[in-house]
Amino acid sequence: MIDPLPIDAHVEAIRAHLERHRAAVLTAAPGAGKTTRVPPALVDRGRVMVLQPRRVAVRAVAARIAEERGWAIGREVGWHIRFERAFTRDTRLLVVTEGILTARLQQDPLLSDVTTLVLDEFHERSIHLDLGLALARQAWLARDDLHILVMSATLDATPVARYLNDAPVLHVPGTLHPLQVDYAPGESVAQAVAEVLPRTPGQILCFLPGSREIERARQDLTSRLPPAVETVPLHGSLDGAAQNSAVRASSARRVILATNLAETSLTVPGVSAVVDTGLVKVARYDADRGLDALVTERVTLDSADQRAGRAARLGPGVVRRLWDAHDRLRPSREPDISRVDLAGPVLDVLAWGARPHAFEWFEAPPPDAVAAALDLLRRLGAVSGTDDAVAITELGRRLQRMPVHVRLARMLVEGGGASHVAAACALLAEGRRGARPQGGATPSTPATTDCDLLGDLDRFAQQLPHVRRLADELNRLTRGLGPATPATTRQTSRPASKHTPNATPEVTPEETPEETPEETSEETLRRALFAGYADRLGRRRSGTAGTVLLASGHGAALGRESGVRDGEFLVALDVTAAARDGVTEARIHMASRVEPEWITPTHVVVEHRLDAASGRVRAARVARYDAITLTSTPVAAEPDVAAGLLADAWLARVPGVTDAELLRRLRFARLEVDLPALVRDAAASAASLDAINLGAHLPFDVRRRLDTHAPASLPVPSGRSAPLTYADDGTVTASVKLQELFGLADTPTLGPHAVPVTFSLLAPNGRPVQTTRDLRSFWQRTYPEVRKELRGRYPRHPWPDDPWTATATHRTTNFLRKSSGTG
């Protein structure tokens, strides 16, 4: 006989709605019993698959259903999580994590062996839950016998119901018990536990953000609790046995120190008090490591209410919140799809057969996040083509089937099953700083190395248990892959790492041949790291060991915690950006050396540039890896490209004297020309910027009219020609010695508007003595004064009384006499 729960009275209505509409959304208060009572009531129509967001919840839910129904785990009810399963072909109710559903839909897009799909705790909005709903909806639209039930304790049901073609929404209240909520800002978990322990008879559930905080609280509680009170940790890093033990009923009083995995569907028996730190670790894309990371943040209001509700499921409860009552919490949690790396989900969508930009997501991800995911997948070789015509590759299908981030999957494939590569992936997956060996620390000044992970691998037996366990799982997953690239082991003075992750019980020694030096080589590891972090390539700047140009184009400094001090190229495995004096400078915490021969250019182009010193166009064939220049070889410049660069440079600079004068002449003559076209035409035959001659490339008719209306020089009575200067204000000037104009009475005019030439009249020494636009007036009024002033200074030059009839000349008087035979 199982105890009645609030949900029991609504089960038949839920069944009826599913039968009629094939989809429904159920919201039920915490403790109503939806997770353990609704799915078993649906198995008479066929296999039921239940999605849970966490592995410990999957096992606990399956165990609770088996206990209530008298079923056997692995027979009527089973579970399936990453790397572990307990079910058979005849299992009627299967509890799984969301990633398992996605993998099944890849193999069977119609989900043909499932009749009812239950998505529990949908309010958590994990990326796999969103993706699972979107893929399952396609199967639901294609099958008229598939049912979908979305369940949550706190959920705005309207968007989900609308997504499922306006499915009905059912609300089920829970049993309300009195709940006393106290606030104690600044109080430690141990102090809070000591305060509530004598006030309640049941278990105390404490919410902390992570395993490290749990361990510190456990040590702090040791000296504060009576010996009869047990302290039990509950977090995702524990193995299944430890997690199951934490959620079993116990006659002893317990303090359960848990992360948010105890917040929803996972029931911890006998809880009457909750201590809430108000903190939670949230998955967010960590650009520093190129992977998702857990970031400690303030809990949201809906989560805080759910945590509090754990204390009032069985009777009156007490909640002690370790923050100020006036603190404002965000109302609800943010969906994963807006904050995590989408490379894996995008690859899943492509493997399923859709295009990410056109896929019918429950909530569409940010377009720039999809674009970034495609860029990474393209670099890893998982996809090909442009975003509009992207396609998954064979390598991409291999990566998609691996239950790790695509970077790490690419490493595993490249490593060809090498165990130390699997161990390195485990370290990177957990974050090297978050996977520090027990009782160990990284030296402040590490020894010079080719890879910063080598020391961690040598001490791998000291790593935290969940890191070693993940390495074992990955090693088992990839055993037998074979090398992805030919073994080209470089001989080094450092011996190969001796680490071999713990053997799994299922594999006998005969199935695990002793690893060869090639398989455990340092080079194999470094090649695998480069394959997984290909977008993080860096090249040391010339003449420095500590500064690097990254493939992204940003600069970075190698941190003192990295020992990778040799080699021209490296790959940045952990890099952060830090503001310093207003300048953002990246800092590389962990790196691995890359050999030049491993690098294949991302593009090879012939680049042209204008050499400022010579004014000539230089060309080189440049091989690049994104923003990093690998090689540059001089080649002959392409004429069209060179002409374009010269033309652009001419148009961008202040024109030279000759060109400026030509442009003023054209304006003076009122002649319109297509200047850019003229410059390009002239540049096509020029070897340098200074060799561009616009005048030589004017159309014939323009040149003829230009010579007529704005000639470059003016013939003067002396028989010579005086250069003309055209000013921006529309005037034209000729500088001429006064004696060369004798006999010229009227001022010449030029151009369509007959503009008089302005004469700058020069003394014999070349200095101007008078400026005039009216020669007749000058000869009549001004010349006598000029003659009187200058003939004494320059007696060798003619100064006739009558300039009207004198012979114009640029010669001296003595020269004229000798020429005429009178001297």
Image (cartoon, helix red, strand yellow):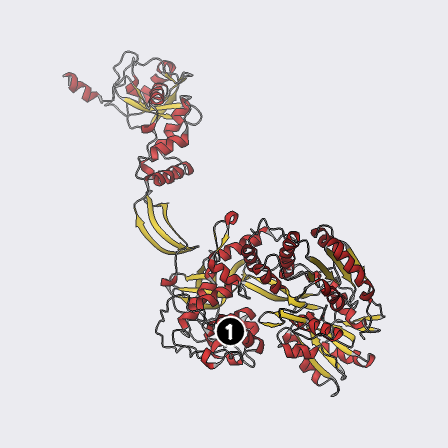
As helix, strand or loop, the secondary structure at mark 1 comes to helix
User: In front: 571, or 741?
Assistant: 571
Quadrant assignment, res 268: bottom right
Quadrant assignment, res 677: top left
Vertical relation: 280 (above or below) 554? below
Please give the count of numbered marks on the rendered protein.
Answer: 1
Vertical relation: 58 (above or below) 552? below
User: In front: 385, or 598?
Assistant: 385
Vertical relation: 725 (above or below) 460? above
Vertical relation: 504 (above or below) 736? below
| Residue 45 position within the rendered picture, expressed as x and y whole percent measured from the top left | 72, 62
| Residue 759 position within the rendered picture, expressed as x and y whole percent measured from the top left | 36, 21
Tag 1: residue type?
Arg
Q: Quadrant of the C terminus?
A: top left
Q: Residues within 10 Å of mark 1 (few under 14, many from 20)?
A: many
Quadrant assignment, res 199: bottom right
| Residue 310 position within the rendered picture, expressed as x and y whole percent measured from the top left | 77, 71
Q: Residue at x 37, y 34 (%)?
A: 680
| Residue 645 position within the rendered picture, expressed as x and y whole percent measured from the top left | 38, 40
Q: Is residue 551 left or right of residue 83?
A: left
Q: Residue at x 35, y 69 (%)?
A: 488
Kindly give the residue lying farthest to the top in the view shown: 805
Q: Is residue 460 left or right of residue 628?
A: right
Q: Which residue is mark 1?
A: 476
Kindly give the residue lying farthest to the bottom in the view shown: 227
Task: Say whether residue 561 is visible.
Answer: no
Task: Say whether residue 139 is visible.
Answer: yes
